[in-house]
Amino acid sequence: MCGIIGYTGPQACKNLILDGLERLEYRGYDSTGIVLLEDGELRRDRTVGKVAELRQIVGDNHSSARLGMGHTRWATHGGVETRNAHPFLSNDGRLAVLMNGIFENYVELRAEVSANGHELESATDTEALVHLLADAYEGDLVEAVRRVYPRLEGHFAFLVMSRDEPDRIVATRLAWPPLVVGKGESEMYIASFLPAFLDRTRQVQHVEEGEIVDLRPTGATFWPMAGGAAVDRAVEEADASIEVAEKGGYETFMLKEIHEQPRAIADTIGERFRDGQLHLDGVGLTDAELADVQRVLIVACGTALHAGLVGRYLIEEWAGIATEADVASEWRYRHAVFDPRTLVLAISQSGETADTLAAMQLARERGAKVVAITNVMGSAVTRAADGVLYTRAGLEIGVASSKCFTAQIALLTLVALRLAELRWRLPADRVAEIGRGL
């Protein structure tokens, strides 16, 4: 996954964008780039390597720019070369674009823009986007995005800026790649991940799939893709701190997060055991509905699926309910058979996993009850489920999951215990005993 950040406001933004990129660099990126608006022109620097190398290339240049965007790339389409690094500029230097994700129909798009006379310098999918936007641009970035968006297939989040609109960044997203807006004092940030700007502001707004966010120093406006009135979006207080995103004296984020597992498990269990009683507030089903469950289906991807395999064992062992765990990207294409007494547990650490979301929506369409298990409040799975159970692991940065995985297992243990208790498979004193052990 690539990292992206943008800024518009009164400050000279070169260093704050570079600082944000360094906080997005933790996943091991292979190239990086920045574009800044200065003296009416888009100034771009790119390099293969780390942000520290980009910082050296930029040097003391562009010190007056107050609008800019930065990108750290993990190569998908096109090799690890400077020409494939983001951002990309239109041939006339009027627009700049950067993106996280992929276009699945990029071959056709590249052929089209090339036939329209645009010179392609890279081997990427993203470069086609900047030329499509350039053809659609008539002085309003929002309208250009609105015209181009329906033609894009895949999963992505992108930012675009124009030298003709010197205080504006426009962005949108489709499927899982996230975007979060940061609101400052007469300045605005946007990024793929909170740590990029948490040292500047903790006032955030989340960009929904299929909408356009229009950033100016005075604030963010959220527009429906189909047009019409702007959407009100609440400003939330981020519950993570920049200190959490730092390594805290450990050599790596993963080592830090391994040592955070006891706290993550304790917080996940937390008040769910009170006075020997198990409470699963937020599950979204009545005790009678839970007791009536005849089958459990666990859908997830990657690490979350492995947690689900442990959960399957516990539910079958304690509750005596037939349980299966399936990878969401495969299950959604099966003709699965189930009825309203099937409980679907959908597990996603980020709450934005596209295949898991699709599986949840399909399960609900077929009449099943769906409970999401996630680590992120307000994420997409929380809005697609009948109930939500949160792990409380905090921000996890390491690519190989540790504390979120064990927190998921802890929460699935509680689910298995609750089902067993309601089905009279485990007596209350045994549930309380296991609770004390946890």
Image (cartoon, helix red, strand yellow):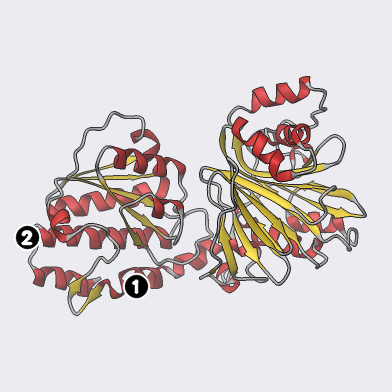
Separation of residues labelled 2 and 1 (CA atoms): 26 Å
Seen as rendered, the residue at the extreme right is 39
Q: Secondary structure at mark 2?
A: loop
Whether residue 154 is visible, yes or no, is: yes
Answer with the quarter of the image where residue 263 lies: bottom left
Residue 346 placement (x, y as % from top left): 34, 49
Q: Residue furthest front?
A: 229
The residue where tag 1 is placed is 266
131 vs 427, left or right, is right
> Sequence order check: which comes first, mark 2 or mark 1?
1
- Residue lying at 25% horizontally and 70% vertically, measured from the top left: 438
Quarter residue 218 falls in: bottom right
Residue 24 horizontal/vertical position (percent)? 64, 57
Dot 2 amino acid type: Trp
Compared to residue 236, the image places residue 31 above or below, namely above
Q: Write down the residue under mark 2.
A: 424
Q: Is residue 327 above or below residue 203?
A: above
At a point 52% along the width and 58% down the height, the residue shown is: 398
Location of residue 353 in the rendering, given as x and y in whole percent from the top left corner: 45, 46
**As drawn, which residue projects farthest toward the bottom?**
275
Taking depth in this image into account, of 228 and 405 the one nearest to the observer is 228
Q: Is residue 168 left or right of residue 180?
A: right
Circle 1 residues within 10 Å: few <14, some 14–19, many ≥20: some
Of residue 152 and residue 336, the one placed in the foreground of this image is 152
The amino acid at mark 1 is Ala
Question: Which mark identifies residue 257?
Answer: none
The secondary element bearing badge 1 is classed as helix
Taking the image as drawn, is residue 251 in sight?
no
